[in-house]
Amino acid sequence: MIPSRQIRAVFDDAAVTVYQAYSPEIAEPALAAQTFVPPFKRERMTWIKPSFLWMMYRCGWAAKPGQTRVLAIRVSREGFAWALANSCGSSPAAGETEAAWKARLAASPVRVQWDPERDVRLARLEHRSIQIGLSGEAVDRYAGQWIKGIEDVTALAKDVGAEVAAGRFEEARALLPPERPFPLDPATADFIGATPHAVRP
């Protein structure tokens, strides 16, 4: 059984891969600079997703307007840890009052929410996938410090989508990035609302 709330990602000792989808007007300068530059707006909240299939659900296999270029961004492990440590959930924690949660949400530069993970058909699964929203200081750190590289994976998105459209689901799964459980210490897991002790360091 996959834990209800567990971070799954492509990662190594240096970085964690997350996904975003943009228009060519934002993606091309980002690829050239290997970080996000104008017309990317640091003033807006930007959501990063470690799950490739959740990104595919969001962008429709790179077919939705404004999301036709899918980027794989390598974020430093230190930056990823900072984001989790400075986050606030998208709903009150267990035992937390609405007022206390709203105050914490207003003060936090990072928002975390757990959405239903998707299978290769993009159908809803029972377990959840983490989405991380960066704003303010977190966006500045993301674009200015954390990004170790950006790769265009639009072709991969379209290839997987084409296999799915043709009913070749095993072939589609074989193309997916090799995501695996990301190690969290119990304190961090508890803080972000992950399934307790689902992954040990």
Image (spheres, rainbow, N blue to C red):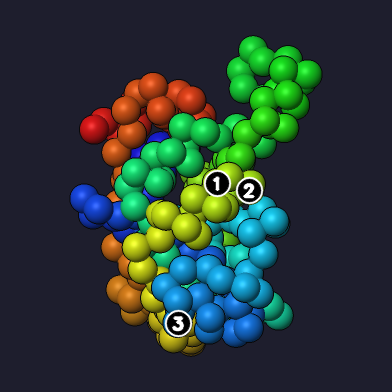
Query: Few, some or many C-alpha atoms within 10 Å of disc 3 (few <14, some 14-19, many ≥20)?
Result: few
Q: In the visual, does 180 lie left or right of 146?
A: left
Which element is circle 1 on?
helix
Q: Residue at 66% x, 74% y: name it.
A: 39
The residue under label 3 is 32
Which element is circle 3 on?
helix
Any mark on residue 94, and which?
Answer: none
The residue under label 2 is 135
Query: How far apart in space, not on screen, are marks 3 and 1 (Cα)?
Result: 22 Å
Q: Residue at 51% x, 29% y: name it.
A: 193
Q: Position of residue 147 (x, y in %)?
A: 40, 60
Q: Position of residue 97 (x, y in %)?
A: 73, 15
Q: Quadrant where the C terminus lies?
A: top left
Q: Residue at 60% x, 84% y: name it.
A: 24
Res 50 quadrant in image: bottom left
Residue that lies at the very extreme toward the right in this rendered image: 99
Q: In the visual, does 96 lie left or right of 156?
A: right
Q: Quadrant where the N terminus lies?
A: top left
